[in-house]
Image (cartoon, rainbow, N blue to C red):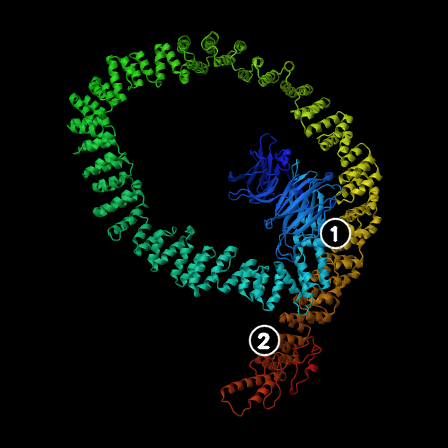
Amino acid sequence: MAAPVPVLFNEALNLTNSGVAAESIKFGSTSMESDKYITVCDSSSGTPQIIIVDMSAGNEVKKRPIKAEAAIMNPLSQVLALRSGTTLQIFNLELQARMKSSTMNEQVVFWRWTSNNNIALVTPTAVFHWSIEGESAPVKLFDRHQSLAEGVQIINYQVSNDKKWCLLMGIKAGAGGVIDGQMQLYSVDKRVSQVLQGHTAVFTTILPEGRTDKAQVLCFEEKKPDQPSKLFVMEVGREVKEGTFRLQPVAIPVPADAPNDFPVSMQASSDQGIVYMVTKMGYLYMFDVFTAKCLYRARITQGTIFVTAPITGGGIIAITARQGQVLRVGLNKEALAPYVVTTLRDSELAISLASRLNLPGADDLYVNQFQQLLAQGNVAAAAKLAAKSPNGVLRCPDTISRFQAIPGQPGQPQPVFQYFSILLESGKLNQLESIELARPVLQQGKAQLLEKWLQEDKLHCSEQLGDLIASVDVNMALSIYLRAEVPEKAINCMMQRGEFDKIVAYATKVGFRADYTYMLQSLAHSNPTGALEFAKQLANASLVDPNQVVELFMSQNRIQETTAFLLEALKANKPEEGYLQTKLLEVNLRGGSPQVADAILQNKMFTHYDRPYIGKLCEAAGLSQRAIEHFTEVDDVKRSLVAMCSNPQTMNPDFVIAFFGSLSPDDSIECLKELLGRNMRGTIQIVTQVAAKYTEQIGSEKLCTLFEDFKCYEGMFMYLGQIVNLSTDPHVHFKYIESAAKTQNFKEVERVCRDSTVFDPATVKAFLMEAKLPDPRPLIQVCDRFDFVDEMTAYLYSNNATKYIEVYCQKVSPAKTPFVIGKLLDLDCNEDFIRGLLNSVGINCPVDDLVEQVERRNRLRLLQPWLEAQVATGNRETATHNAIGKIYITLNRDPNSFLKNNQFYDPAVLGKFCEKLDPSLAFVAYQRAAGSCDDQLIEVCNANGLFKDLARYLVEKQDGDLWATVLNVAEDAVETPNRRALIDQVVQTALPETKNPDEVSSTVKAFMAGELTSELIELLERIVLQGSDFSENKNLQNLLILTAIKADPSRVIEYINRLDNFDGPEIAKIAVSSEYELFEEGFVIYTKFSKREKDAAAKAQLDVAAISVLVDNLHAMDRAKEFAERVGTDEVWSTLAKAQLREALVNEAISSFIKAKDPSYYTEVIAKAEEAGSYDQLTPYLSMARKKVKEPTLDTMLIYALARADKLGELEEFVAAPNVANIQNIGERCFNEELYKSAKILFASVNNNAKLAVCYVNLGQFREAVDSATKANAVSTWKEVSKACVEAKEFRLASMCGMHIIVHPDHLEELINLYTREGYPDELISMLEQGCGLEGAHAGVFTELAVLYSKYNPSKLMEHIKIFWSRMNISKLLRACEKARLWTEAVFLFKEDGQFDSAVKMMVEHPTAFVHDLFLDCCQKVRNTEVLYKAISFYLEFEPSHLNKLLNVLTPNLDHSRVVHLLRKSEALALAAPYLKSVQKENLSAVNEALNELYIEEEDYESLRSSIDDFDNFEQLVLAQKVEKHELLEFRRVAAYLFKKNKRYTESMDLSKGDKMYKDAIDTASDSNNAELVENLLRFFVEEQKDQECFCACLYTCYSLVQPDVAIELAWRFQMTDFVMPYVIQYVRHMHDKVKKLEDSIAPKEEDVDTNTQAVESMMGMQPDGGMLQLGNGGGYPGYAGGGGMPMPPQNGGMYNNGGGMQMQGNMGGMPNMNQNMGMGGF
């Protein structure tokens, strides 16, 4: 497997797969300004469109029908710039609006976005900048230099980040097929240009080492004639020359197979400091900007890259021409550093890159360099290296320890402080570094430094750091705890600072729950206001039980605080808080603050409290209104309402009205009855207001009944008066009219009757007639509005109120006079009164209604005088003339004259009137209507047989719709006789009579529309063929032929031959259409008109149309060929050829195209010929075509046809002659189709030695293949030739090829696979051995040779790797060694590569490779401590004799507890005893316990005792229990000692007593300071042991713990009085001194006492008279001035070195010598 490369490469998408035509993927048509959008101008489908690929939205493709030459998308936003000729436009696609446009004076040859709001425009002479902001036009920036003027193609344009430098790049053809590059660098500030020889460049910004300001760098490729390409990196625009960043030019490693390749694009990543350069042949170069070194080179595509763009975050994206590959190239951070180390072998560069880009893979390099710097004593450099180490590999505890261990130099800060200082300068410390820095800073009292660093966010905040600072600065600790998210300790700090208001917010934010109840209790006593605010915050955050808070405040009688808290806590108004809501109201109602409760209830803050209970409390507190709100029983409500309303001063009308809204309708009625019944006069006002307010809920009928029950019509009038104007209830309006009438409010009665629209008119009318009001106007209003005119007239006429009738007709409603007159006629009223009434009304009386009413009663002549009078006055009213007309028609007074001459009557009315009297009069009337009565006219004519009149009317009218009415017949209907009779009259009478061509035309159209084809043909033949004024009319001839085409195709050919004046081509198109398919008739028309046509172009067009009918419609190819031969024009032959091509008659089509001399369809001809394989016939056509069209396709296809026809001689002659064929592509095609001889000729003509070599290979000419490969000098060619030679067993030639392949690392593995796959490893090894001596031999050669040795010749491997290990890929070779089980070689490689961990593992896992000294050396350098423990296990199993040596070497890096566990598990503690003793100084429990076990096992009690005294970190009680039953006394004494140390005095004394170690028991009792234990020991000595000496010694040693009565009693009982006497004497003296001291304190001072002497004597423990010293031990007797006696001297034979012994002071009065006679062996 090949080693990872430092780039990540993939194909993001393929534009051809996204619907983009390959021919549109090229420079100028496709643009990419950023990694977001790709824009393509595509016109391949015939419809111009813009294709936008949104790569940021999952490669979404959008197509827009826009015609433009070029388009570029804004790098960030959806803003599109379009260019067509000299016109530029910018559109916002999101807003679908044009932003701005401009027209240039010159053609734009290149353009691109230089920023988000600026476009650069390059013309043949100058460079312009065009901002998309505002309305400004493009601004000229500078002129193009003359070296970039002519023959130079502009390929790129760059602007620096500060907009002060511009770079124009172009290319042009040079000598020898080389592409030269020219660049113009322009300074905006200085307005000067400089020409650079190169192809591409890029601006970027970097931060050079040692500078704080960024450098603006220009990176460009320089290529001068006859000189290698170089990369220049220099800073531009820096005013200060000192410190300017500039590198020496570096040669660009151009591959041998691409000497004429040139770069087309260069992109830079400022974040990475990497420059990506892409060449035309698809090579990718990657350079480090800081050193200009080439990091990587590889060919990423065989296609031509024409556009690139940078990727956000680093990398580039590129597009290949025609192929449409969108390639994405990025940095492989995991592999870059290893690649630089192993392949480039540049450790310094690897460290620089890893530090700058935080790359993995360089950890070992950093560690080694760090160790070297420390070894050299260069502390500052080592600190800087550690600070910049990637991923913090050196920022670990070991590094800090190493700096701490370095001694400081005089006058300089400690090395560890230098390290921390550099870390602070470079960034933020990690957790461990922050803690280690804080310790010494706090010790020096410089906490302000920590505060400064915290403000600058230089420290990592952790709980440990906060704990460290908490004792010094609470504020700073709080800040740390907050950042470290340690809520418990942060809240403790807030409590120390008294910031209770911040606790809740913080705890809620972090989700921490503290003991808030305790905090609140402590705060309530000292600060009730603060406690209230704190409680509110807790309640809002649901962090405390509100009941507890209420109990807390109420226990201190804090009503105000309780109220405020509950108002805040209960604001959510939750159902479960009902008890607290009740509590809140109760506290205030009973606590003397009813106004607070009233305010709470008024605001309706709560709804879940106990309403009945609160209602009673409100009533008791005098809050009547609130009490009523809470009552639920109707009786209580009625009582409260009466009580409230009885006192107008306390009554709140608004409340009462609003309260009724909460009652049910029935309860409301009950309450209103109660109010009216108790005090009608006093409550009528509020009752009517309530009734009006809730009339919809209660019901107006119930309320009216309520008032009627109490005979309170005034109240009902007041109630209804408030709602009548808004009500739509008829009952309300009627009751209001009734109540108003009964209360004599007649004006209101009239108003409602006049204005209301909802009352029942019949009911109101009946009531008013029955009431017989003095003024009948309300009744008149009702009857007039609701059409009760007859009843009103009868009522007024019967009541002799004729004057009201006159007034009504004259003033109120003259329009209803006809109905009044009609009723009066029914009532047999006097005609004189009627005439007078009619005359008084005059013209205001509607005539229609009047005539209808009078005519209905057969009294029409009554109106004649009145009507004639109206006409005489000039009345033009239609109704008047209709009425007088009816009278004249009835009386037969010249009606025909009236109907023809009168202009004011309605023809429809009188026509209808005349239909039964005289149909001819009806026809006259309807004809007079000017078309509005056509339907009635047709009906009358059909009904009475007036067909001739109707036919003439229709012809004259020329109305298509009217014709359709009489001629159209429904699909399922049968033709009526009327229709046929009408048609006959039209044909026979009406149409022959007319001389108007328009009437003829409209009639014909009507027949056509009515689909009367046979009748139409008959009509037209009569007009056109039989001779008339319209015989030569072109339209009629056209119509006749078209009608025949539709109705009778058999007659079409006759008409074509007989008629001459018609539109032939148009008729022919219709005839041959798919609807009629009269192809022969169409062909006849085309040939007939072609013969008559004089114009050559028109004649040719008709001939083409004629032959098109033959080939397209009749498919008569033979007739078409005959026709073409007869006509003989190029157009006809061309049409025939295309048809033959469609019919797959390829040979015939080619022949026709040749006769037509038409090369325009060469693409289709070529395609069809290729399908048919007609290459011989294709050759003359292509020869003809290339004479007229200079297209590469023709020449290319001609070459291919010659090759397919195997005409190699002609092919060679054609290739040698001038041509525009794409020989390369056709050569590839011939090669792919195995036409190797033809391909050889073609490749030789274009000097494509690479392909030529492959052709020789396929032809079996291997020597020639090698020669061609030598000329090509391309890796791919060498590979193909080599493969062929190997397969042909031409190993010598294969080796020659291989020498050129193995120098390329990317292709070496493929070559090796070839040899191994074919089974020739020995030949491969031989070739690689020769390759090791090549100048270009690289690591891959040595590595692969070693791998082959491991597989096929292991004996040579060790020698090979010892010589060349530094030039190998260690990791790959290691895998090979492991696979071949060559462990010794693998260990050697691991060691030399610095992989000591792996070397140790390998020796552990494979003992055959173990070497003791090598193993120890590697173990000291491993980094993974787990390996050390595996090494220990290995030594335990295989090398136990050297275990201690290994452990001693590894001691600094071991976890000794884990080692002990490992040894214990292997039962090898004794084996590692020297190691355990050497590390016991660290006082580790595991080590101490292990050694103690060894001492016990070895019965070495002295070492065990020394271990216990010196190292106390172990489970002492466990050890004590383990040895308390040991067979050796000294071990049991150790157990007793351990029990005493752990205050297990009883167990210790029991053990000592059991072993008769009484001195130990006495010392233990003294140390216990327990009088009970001392008493038990004394009893043990006297009762069980009868040991007088021990009894006396215990009294002495435990003097301060002995009860005097116990000591004297035991001595008296067991005859030991002499042995108790020293104790008694001492006790009496102490008591005497105490009494004396008390006496002296109360006695007057004596002047002659020498106080100084007494003080000295007292301090010495002596009496002034020089008496003897007193016994004393331990703490002394309480209150004794001597301070506790004198201590025992050290005992040499005991187990203690100090304290606890016994010493007799002075003369004991005959006491025996204790040391000699007490028999206590341990004393």
Instruction: Say which amino acid is labelled 2.
Output: Ala
Residue under the image location 40 percent in, 54 percent down = 579
Looking at this view, name the residue that lies furthest to the front: 146
SS for dot 1:
loop
Residue under the image location 50 percent in, 89 percent down = 1645
Q: Earlier in the sequence, mark 2 or mark 1?
A: 1
Please state which of residues 181 and 862 is positioned toward the viewer in this rendering: 181
In the image, 1039: left or right of 350?
Answer: left
Split into 4 quadrants, where in the image is the C terminus?
A: bottom right
Please state which of residues 1006 and 99 is positioned toward the viewer in this rendering: 99
Q: Which mark is residue 1544?
A: none
Looking at this view, name the residue that lies furthest to the top: 1026
Q: Position of residue 1001 (x, y in %)?
A: 44, 14
Q: Residues within 10 Å of mark 1 (few under 14, many from 20)?
A: some
Q: Position of residue 1481 (x, y in %)?
A: 70, 68
872 in relation to 94, above or below: above
Q: Position of residue 289 (x, y in %)?
A: 67, 51
Q: Which mark is residue 345?
A: 1
Give the residue at mark 2: 1571
SS for dot 2:
helix
506 in relation to 834, above or below: below
In the image, 872: left or right of 1502?
Answer: left
1206 in relation to 385, above or below: above
Q: Residues within 10 Å of mark 2 (few under 14, many from 20)?
A: some
Q: Position of residue 249 (x, y in %)?
A: 71, 50
Instruction: Say which amino acid is labelled 1.
Output: Arg
Estimate the spatial distance between the alpha carbons at disc 2 and disc 1, rounded to whole Å.
82 Å
In the image, 530: left or right of 275?
Answer: left
